[in-house]
């Protein structure tokens, strides 16, 4: 299992794993600097942006494993 889980906060993930910023950008998550990123977890953020939370987490974990 990966280090990133869908219950983690968006901002927490970006701060712990800066290499994920590129993935968020590729997927159109422009909210990294907005207030929602401070309290929203990956699952909620993925749903708001129309993504499957499990796919998002898989992509983020893949990025940090490289």
Image (spheres, grey):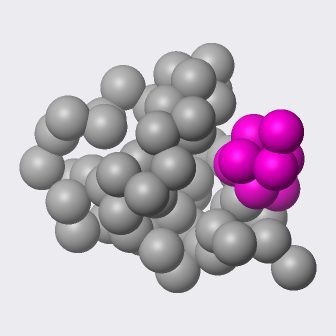
Residue 24: where, in percent of width, then height? Answer: 54, 33
The dominant secondary structure in magenta is helix
- Residue 41 falls inside the magenta stretch: no
Q: Residue at x 52, y 80 (%)?
A: 7
Q: Is residue 14 above or below residue 18?
A: below
Q: How many marks?
A: 0
Residue 30: where, in percent of width, then height? Answer: 36, 26
Residue 48 vs residue 14, the one in the foreground: 14
Residue 51 vs residue 17, the one in the foreground: 17
Residue 33: where, in percent of width, then height? Answer: 20, 35
- 27 left or right of 63 in image: left
Residue placed furthest toward the front: 66
Q: Residue at x 43, y 57 (%)?
A: 16
- 6 left or right of 37 in image: right
The span shown in magenta is 58-66
Q: Is residue 23 above or below residue 8?
A: above
Q: Is residue 40 above or below residue 48?
A: below
Q: Residue at x 56, y 68 (%)?
A: 43
- 56 left or right of 36 in image: right
Q: Is residue 59 visible?
A: no
Quadrant that contains the N terminus = bottom right
């Amino acid at each position: 299992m990966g280090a990133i889980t869908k219950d983690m906060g968006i901002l927490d993930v970006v701060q712990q794993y800066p290499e994920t910023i590129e993935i968020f950008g590729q997927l159109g998550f422009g909210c990294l600097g907005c207030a929602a990123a401070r309290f929203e977890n990956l699952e909620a953020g993925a749903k708001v942006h129309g993504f499957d939370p499990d796919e998002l987490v898989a992509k983020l974990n893949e990025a940090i494993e490289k």
